[in-house]
Image: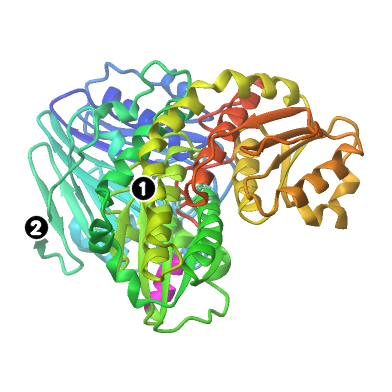
Amino acid sequence: MCGIIGYIGASKAIPIVYSGLASLEYRGYDSAGIAYFLNDDIKVIKEKGKLINLKEKLNFDTDTFLAIGHTRWATHGEASITNAHPHSVGKFTVVHNGIIENYSTLKEELKMRGYTFKSETDTEVIPALLDYYYKDEQDILKTINKVSKKLIGSFALGIICRDDANAIYALKNSSPLIIAKSKTGNFLASDVPAILKYTNKYILLDDGDMAKITKDTITIYDTNLNTVNKETLTFTGSKKTAEKNGYEHFMLKEINEQDKVFKDTIGSYFDGTINSLEKNFGFLKNFKKINIVACGSAYHTGVIAKHLIEEYANILVYTEVASEYRYQKNFYDEDTLVILVSQSGETADTLAALRKAKNDGIKTLAIVNVLGSSVARESDYCIYTKAGIEVSVATTKAYLSQLTVFSLITMYLGYINKVIKKDELESIFKDIKKMPKLIKEEINNYQEYYNIADKISKNKQIFFIGRGLDYANSLEGSLKLKEISYINSVAYQAGELKHGTISLIEASTPVIAIATNKDLVDKTISNIKETKARGAFVIYESFIEPVDKFYDEFIKIPEVHPILESILTIIPLQLLAYKVAKNNNCDIDKPRNLAKSVTVE
Ligand code: G6P
């Protein structure tokens, strides 16, 4: 959600900043802009819509060696050229990721001081404040420091000032911001993919940090303007993780990486022995209750984990979406562990839920993909998922890696709580070994799911049904489909359908029914038959071969232990959603209105 990039160095800046913006496209945006120094003045070029529109207005050959760029996901004011960043007032030009919560008050104050505003954005108050305080301070750093204390909300800022053609300034609070040094120049960026072409070394700024970046130097300051040293981190993944590698879409590439992601995630915490689980998950013993809090697909892994941990480890689990959890009354105590699940580790609601729990003295565990992200850093414990960089807005491999971590957690807690006995544990170990091959086989089986997709692509609505764990699986199957294909899709508890929703089933309405729970399969089949009797086009997903043919299509998946089964359940549904979206010519990697990293409330 909004991407920032800044470059200063020996190379021409516009192509570098433009390609940085292209690698941040995945965050979601609807307008973009660049500001650069030319002949001691700042030029700003902005455009609505995709980056390609901006490209047409840019001259890549311009003799400028300092530029900042921005992709904007509209919050305050429509997607338009005027509302697009960078925003300039007086001598200052800024790009901003986040939300200034007190912008209306600040705007009124600034209006009284004679400022006028062109845009509807919250951001425009920032250059206006900088301009106002600079008149007295006449020192850029001191001015930024002063302004930082006036702003309430989240902000990652790239700032340039007409009086200093040799530096980009940065300020961070709540929204992510990294700084990087390369052989040809220095950077600031919202995320690692933007700099990977030039360097894999970067520094994470902390809240309150300011930075001055010149061609040769990077200086970081704390809130008292004292210089601070920060650890330089190294991105260890392949540069190729941020490229399509011949696949038509990032989503397809990421689906295809899932066997490796499973192996990498398992391999980081489990070496085939219970000792390795004890070493990595031993701290879980201290808790009697678990709350899982997350958003979107990450929340769905929490719903699955609730079923698994309650069933196999006898521990009470409460799962809630973060935007609700952060404002509701929470019945937690010192025996409760709050688990935050997040790919980005920067989701505003998840971060707020974490801070709430911490504030109440409750212990927290982060299950996060992005190294050093805010949720990872602020939690008491952290388990990294090993999905690598995920670019497609619709998550696939990160979701699978979160499920993988929950499988390990369930296995460990189940064993120490004596629900999973030694024999069962050993059979799970065997299944874990088989999983990469089974995942690969499913992926290679894509044509079968594509054929089914071709039969439902023109429908206006598609239902997913299941009971228990299969309902939890349905939630993600349904979200994957609707977010990228724009076909209305609802996940329903199979037994609940008859209490209202069944009235929506008519001739040829697709119903995707998941049945992997042996104890409940007959009940689910009865519910499927109820839809079939009303003309539904039934797609049945299971490893349980039915005796009678009550379905139109059968997605047969391999059978493994239930704590691993959800991983094999989702892959056909990811590929099905992908093909439906492709058939409907949708923008698969960047679905309309969505952002990958949702850093606003
Ligand atoms: C957005 C994305 C989803 C993601 C959710 C949570 O809505 O589009 O794919 O599941 O945020 O993101 P997180 O980074 O916290 O996992």
Tally of marks: 2
Mark 1: secondary structure = helix
Q: Quadrant of residue 323?
A: bottom right
The percent coordinates of residue 429 (x first, y second) are: 36, 48
Residue identifier under label 2:
229
Q: Residue at x 57, y 32 (%)?
A: 572
Q: Is residue 128 visible?
A: no
Residue 193 as seen in the image, left or right of residue 101: left
Given contact means CB atoms under 8 Å apart, are the residues at marks 2 and 1 in contact?
A: no
Q: Nearer the viewer, residue 318 or 285?
A: 285
The percent coordinates of residue 48 (x first, y second) are: 53, 31
Q: State the CA–CA distance, disc 2 to disc 1.
A: 44 Å
Mark 2: secondary structure = loop
Label 1 packing within 10 angstroms: few (<14), some (14-19), many (20+) = some
Give the magenta-colored segment's residue range: 352-358
Residue type for callout 2: Asn
Q: Is residue 218 visible?
A: yes
Of the numbered discs 2 and 1, the one sitting upstream in the chain is 2
Q: Residue at x 15, y 60 (%)?
A: 221
Residue 354 lies in the magenta-colored region: yes
The percent coordinates of residue 478 (x first, y second) are: 65, 42
The percent coordinates of residue 582 (x first, y second) are: 61, 21
Residue 183 as seen in the image, left or right of residue 568: left
Label 2 packing within 10 angstroms: few (<14), some (14-19), many (20+) = few
Placement of 528 over or under 124, stated as above or below: above
Placement of 597 over or under 294, stated as above or below: above
Q: Indicate if the residue with disc 2 has its beta carbon within 8 Å of ligand 1.
A: no
Q: Residue at x 56, y 40 (%)?
A: 569
Main SS of residues in magenta: helix
Residue depth check, mark 2 versus mark 1: number of the one nearer the observer: 1
Residue type for callout 1: Phe
